[in-house]
Structure formats: C-alpha cells, structure tokens
Amino acid sequence: MTTGPIVGRIMLVAFEGWNDAGEAASSAVRAVIEACGLEPFDEIEPDDFLDFTFARPQIRRLEDGSRALSWPATIAYAPTRSSVREAIADDAGLPVSTGAEGELFALLGAEPSRNWLDFAEQAVDIARQCEVDAIVFVGAMLADVPHTRPTPTSITSESASLRHRLGVAQSEYEGPTGVMSVIAMAAEQLGIQTASVWASVPHYVHATHVPKATIAIIDRLSELLDVTVPLGELPRLAGEWETGVDELADRDDDMRAYIGHLEQQRDTAESPEASGEALAKEFQRFLETQTPEDEDEDGADGASSGEGDEPTAPPPPV
C-alpha cells in the first residue's frame, strides 16, 4: 500500500509484447491517457528498432476507398487537451485528475526488437524534454497465480526518496531483463527517479486481453499518480472473463485441480498481494523456461527475444 502519490512531473512507460501479458499494462496506460486527455506530441520512429515480421504494419481502407498503412511506433503523449479532460470529468461525475493534472506524460508502443541502447537514449531524451521528475514503468507477466483471487501487483523503485515516499522496496531481481530496465538505468544516471508497477497474470489462461489485470494496474496507478480513472466497461468485462475461465476449468479436471492448488498457495501466503521479491522470483522462474533459441543472441546490442513474445509459464501438472 502506497503512503502517498508521486509528486512532480511523471511519465508512464509501457510496451506491447513481452512486457504486456494479457495486454494488461498497455490497456491500463491507454486508460490513463484517455482519462487525462493526453495527446500525441512526439514519437520514436520504428525502422531502426522493430522487426516488422513480429510487429506488423496495419492496412486500412479510407473513406474515399483508397488504402493506407499504419506503422507501429512508440508514441509520446502530453497533457495538451485540458478541455477533453474536463469533459471526461463531467461525463463521469467525478474529478478525473487531481494532484497530477497537467503533470502527467506517457510513452506507449511496441517493444523494440533491437538497438536497445539507442532506443533508450531517445526515450530518455523525450522524458528530459518534458522535464519529468519521475518515470513509472508499467508491465504484466505470466505467473503461477489463480484467476479466482485478486490480481497480484508489485511496486518497486531504485530511488531511495521514492521508496521512502511510497513505502515500497527495491527490487532484488538479478538475471535477464527487458528494455524497460535499460531505459530505467539510463534515466537514473541523469537523475530521473524511477518506479515499476507489475501485475501477475494467470499463465494457464490463453486470452488476448485480461481485463481483471488491467483494473488491478489502474488501481495502483491511481494511487501513485493521484488520479481517478473511470473504469467504464472493464468491471463487466472482467466478470465475463472470470466466468469464462471458470467454465473452462469445470470441464477440465486437471485444470480445476491445478487452480485449487494455486488458490491454496495464495490463501496461505502472508500477504494477499505478492511482494516485490516474490514477483522477481516468479519472473526469474519463467525466464528460465525460455528455450536457448529464444534467448538474446545479440547481447552487445540488447535485442529482445522477439516482438510480441511473453514469458511463458510451464504447463499445469497433469
């Protein structure tokens, strides 16, 4: 539980793909962007950083019948539409933004496949242009957690002042990492504070979007940023998602037994939410399940194992 929101200018950073199990992280950041009326103002061009065989461009038909390509990119957002923010607040009947109004920025896009150091430099340059005081990285990972319990989330920080303010710990994780860590270390070297918010998503559920995890991340971001984000249809979608998984489990004895085992582990844990250390151990465990050909073969350049890949958990015992 956080003891107080982050003060000053804040930038949220999330990437689709490997860091985004169940699309929980990217969906949560999009919800904040929409609620706070943030608008695109800059982007990191994809050509030098993305493998388009994984992050493919999209083609669409325009009103005049012609076709257009939309290329994946990393978009930076800034608080440039106060009127939209006020309109959302009026529609929701509540204040959308409080302490972070006019101080919130975001960086959202596909995770880069290569040239991580150059990508991190561009990302930090955007943060410096916005004169942000802190960057909050948002991610979601596949883990041994039951879908029937609250989604575990964890907040860690490498900044002593933020740890004190938020009442959180420093991550103890060591091992293979993602591009967000590269950006974080580059930001910290320039004096920009960083924090990370991660959610654990049940690995046995094969779903493009896990709305229950999105809600859990939004709740944590609301505390960190001192903003209120309307959930809209998310609670209904989360209920439908959980009911659907229940129905699948009812038809599969092994799956039902495995979920019961996870429920017992969760219920006997000291805290209803996973600690930063426990989350790090989960992360390391799933990284170790990756096959050698999935691992980074370009360590000097920092290439990922492939755009859109997620940490894959072992199958449930049968």
Image (spheres, rainbow, N blue to C red):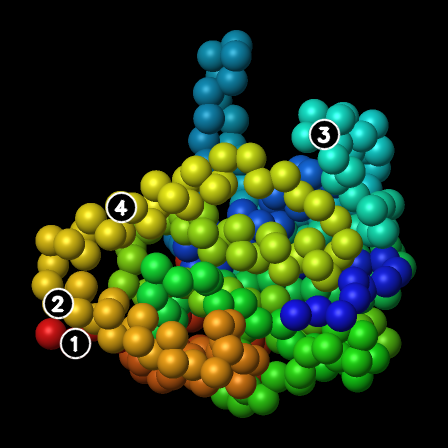
Dot 4 amino acid type: Gly
Q: Which of pointers 1 and 3 indicates the residue nearer the eye? A: 3
At horizontal 56% and vertical 80% (from top left) the residue drawn is: 276
Label 1, label 3: how far apart the Cα atoms are: 48 Å
* Residue 77, numbered label: none
User: What residue is shown with label 4?
Assistant: 244
Give the residue displayed 54% in from the left and 89% down from the top: 174
Residue in the image at 74% along x and 49% along y: 227
Identify the secondary structure beneath mark 2. Answer: helix
Quadrant location of the N terminus in the rendered image: bottom right
- Marks 4/3: CA–CA distance: 32 Å
Residue nearest the observer in this picture, 216 or 178: 216
Q: Position of residue 267 (x, y in %)?
A: 38, 75
Disc 2: which residue: 254
Amino acid, disc 3: Gly
**CA separation, marks 4 and 2?**
17 Å
Residue 287 appearing in the image = no
Q: Amino acid at mark 2?
A: Asp
Residue matched to label 1: 317
State how far apart marks 4 and 1 are (Cα).
21 Å
- Of mark 4 and mark 2, the one earlier in the sequence is 4
Given residues 100 and 48, the one toward you in this image is 100
List x then y, in percent, for residue 289. Answer: 31, 80
User: Mark 2 vs mark 1: which is more N-terminal?
Assistant: 2
Q: Disc 3 vs disc 2: which is toward the camera?
A: 3
Q: Residue at x 74, y 35 (%)?
A: 94
CB contact under 8 Å: marks 2 and 1: yes
- Quadrant housing residue 158: bottom right
Cα separation, mark 3 vs mark 2, equals 46 Å
Residue corresponding to mark 3: 93
